[in-house]
Image: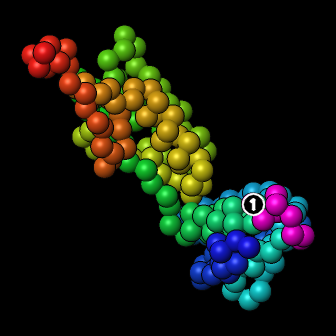
Amino acid sequence: MSRIGKKPIMIPSGVEVIINGTTVRVKGPKGELTKDFNPAILISKEGSMLIVTPKNENKTTRALWGTVRQGLANMIQGVNQEFTKQLQIEGIGYRASVENKNLILNVGFTHPITIEAKPGISFKVEKNIVTVSGVDKDLVSMIAAQTRRVKPPEPYKGKGIRYVGERVRKKVGKKAVAATK
């Protein structure tokens, strides 16, 4: 039995949930999301709560139960208040800017890297901090990971793009290793 799947989802005021078979549409003050879910999971609305239950008890539906419930909770939370991921750019001459809603990264390559803003995603740059925000948690996380993948932090000097608060384990260089022998 799923501990997460058993919990009902509270629908806050100002958020509208429409269930049409396996498709769920959520409208809120920040935006609107629509998503199709697995037909093996039943989604029902009772008052101001969403209840998620499996149709039958087998291994795959039990595995999907909590995932579907958390996906619905993320949709409701996203249309009520946006999700954000912050990335930190570390390195001399490394910078970022926003042009026409797209993110432009200058991180040591011969050309600038452009990351396109998908619908529902917005970028904000302050000094060396890039903020990716939007109503869809999956999309925000995917764009943030794609941005980090452009220049991941290297272990010797720590230059690159990392999440705010991420710790990079630094390695000792050749000189330090040669001096200990």
In the image, residue 122 lies at what x, y percent? Answer: 48, 46
**Residue shown at 32% from the left, 17% from the top:** 108
Task: Say whether residue 144 is visible.
Answer: yes
Amino acid found under the numbered disc labelled 1:
Ala
Q: Is residue 160 magenta?
A: no
Query: Quick one: SS at disc 1?
Result: helix
Residue at image position (90%, 70%) is 56
The residue located at (66%, 79%) in the rendering is: 7
Q: Is residue 77 left or right of residue 34?
A: left
Q: Nearer the viewer, residue 140 or 125?
A: 140
Q: Quadrant of the C terminus?
A: top left
Left or right placement of residue 143 versus residue 63 in this view: left
Q: Which residues are magenta?
A: 55-63
Label 1 belongs to which residue?
A: 63
Does 43 sit left or right of 15 as displayed?
A: right
Q: In the figure, is residue 5 to the left or right of 14?
A: right
Residue 73, image x, y percentages: 63, 69
Residue 30, picture quadrant: bottom right
**So how many labels did they put on this image?**
1
Report x, y in % for residue 1: 74, 73
